[in-house]
Image (cartoon, grey):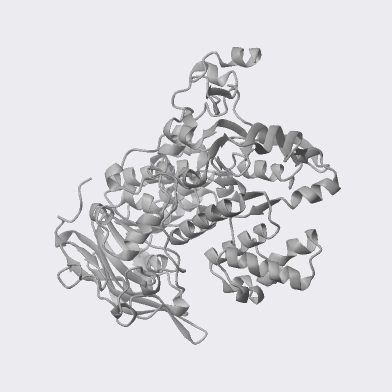
Amino acid sequence: MSESLVQVQNVVKYFPLRAGVFGRVVDHVRAVDGVSLDVPAGSTLGLVGESGCGKTTLARVIMRLLPADSGSIIFSGEDIAKASPEQLRRLRRQMQIIFQDPFSSLNPRMTVGGIVTEPLKIHTDLDRAGRRERAAEVLGVVGLSKRDLDRYPHEFSGGQRQRIGIARALVLQPKLIVCDEPVSALDVSIQSQILNLLRQLQTDFGLTYIFIAHGLNVIKHVSDRVAVMYLGKIVEDGEAHNIFEDAQHPYTKALLESIPVPDPRARRIRATLEGDVPSPLNPPPGCRFHTRCSVAIPVCSEEEPPLLEVTRGHRVACHLVHPDGNSRAEEG
Amino acid sequence: MNAADTKQQTDRLLDLRDLRTYFYVDESVLPAVDGVSFHIDRGETLCVVGESGCGKSVTAQSIMRLIPVPPGRYVSGEIEFDGRDLLRLSSEDIRRVRGREIAMIFQEPMTSLNPVHSVGRQISEVIRLHREPSPKAAMKMAEEALRMVKVPDPHRRIHEYPHQMSGGMRQRAMIAMALSCRPKLLIADEPTTALDVTVQAQILELIRQLKEEVGMAVMLITHDLGVVAEMAERVVVMYAGKVVEQASAYDLFGDPRHPYTRALLECIPRLDQERGELMIVRGQVPSPHRFPSGCRFHPRCPEALDICSEEVPELVQVDGRSVACWLYDAAGEEVS
């Protein structure tokens, strides 16, 4: 495996909850609660979990769109969490984001040219003609054309708008692109166009992706490594084949089973997971998943299981997988 | 779980014949639903599948007569439900059908529930409207309805407001409301699209169980072929306002005939396939402002013939399934 582009160490992000006339902090939403992971350069990390599990917050903390409360984020050898404004400006050039909803993430009053050249205006000293030339080039790469420069977002369909969003992300030649559910709002027949495009761009430009999705079927198609999050914590991560062929955590297994398979002969009872994700305001004690886990044992509600390797590069946080987990974690 | 194609004519609950629902906006005509025919038998689950703008939701709203007229208009066709043509009922009569005989649930349970009333009040309102018991008895029945959809602690939950519930619970409350009058047909328009996959599995399981208990038919609208495979006995595939293929779930997934159906099946990322290049359908989903001539799929079809851009293919029925495509002749054989 090549070296890491991004190394996340023990990142914590709480959102304060205020109440009363004086806006006193009464509690915290524990959106990301001690996450460590590595993203090797040129690969795709799939980040998966139900809504409210903290995957989008984690991605935003990695890009420092939100400041981390503690922990470090090393990007190409520099700590983003401690970067000076100067340093941050330089680092930001190298990381871009693509959003879920191509309808609300493009300014309706700007032309496509304006949208795609804006990052160049901020980060480069190209003149107007140079910026338009570069924008036209990038539009070509994502399957649009130079003619589209002077059109407005409303003239495009959902799939084409997502291509504009990709062009905007690509125009500065970043190293890292965070894809936050980039196909969930698109039609089925358009999704595969966008997924294939993202794949092609990765090969052509050596991009590193952090790819967020709630469906494991999409994740499977794009990811080299996969991290499964539940209530602000990683419960399992590993190479894609570890997760899809040898899932160990009951939550990962339940997620896999809840994806409907497009084959009526494979029809089965699938609702293995009862209830909803508990509130991150007040996560359950011990293993946060124990309230919905079908195989929980008494220790699960008392002690939090550490994230430990089962095989090289494949980590799981579950008492059933590591019966002696806590003593091992202390020794290590 | 056996296929439904052995059912008799007498089991027919809903028969849609050549339905055309058009919208007249700014001097242009949008043929959102353009000659759609299909049927649903009693107790059957029919899935209507298609992408945005294919007319699946307008079809559902036409059955409920919920299309605002104008700008919409039912241009032609019949919607025969339990022996009556719904398009010819007075507005008073259709109100008695809505909610009581045909109930509907929507994609976004937050926007389809009233935020200023408790869920118990909203469910009991439907019960009082159609079954006319006292407020107290209706509330009791609403509580029972919540219990039926497996809302935990219904006695307390009945007093909660929609914003106090999670997305999954709200959708359960919607289903409780829909089923409180024991409808003959439940129309579910993308009921799980806004939900997490784990909650989606719970809701689909619930619909499947309740269908058996209540003995109702279900018309499930979705864009997700995985959901179709889980739920459907029969499937109608729509594209750009028309039905392009209709078959039992087993036939459709085992032997898809229409190039659009095949393309849809091939381009979805699946758990049981290796990582790799996905098949794509070229081009864009057409908007009703500019439907292509002839077969509306022809600009995106990898197998299009000359005739496809000129003449509209009829829906040809053979062996209990049908397909509208020039690649097949009147006997349903592939034209070589």
Q: Nearer the viewer, residue B182 or A240?
A: A240
Q: Between B275 and B222, which is closer to the camera in this rendering?
A: B275
Q: Position of residue B255 (x, y in %)?
A: 24, 56
A52 shown above or below A185: above
Among all residues in the image, which is located at the extreme bottom?
B27
Q: A62 above or below B235?
A: above
Q: Residue A85: in sight, yes or no?
A: yes
**Residue at left offset 61%, top offset 32%:** A233
Tell me residue A311's x, y (percent).
51, 24
Left-right relation of A79 to B261: right
Q: Is residue B69 visible?
A: no
Residue found 78% across the figure and 37% down from its top: A25
Left or right: B234, with B277 as reference point:
left
The one of A181 and A75 positioned closer to us in this rendering: A75
Task: Point out residue B227 in the picture as x, y percentages from the top left corner.
Answer: 37, 50
Question: Residue visible at 61% across and 37% down?
Answer: A2
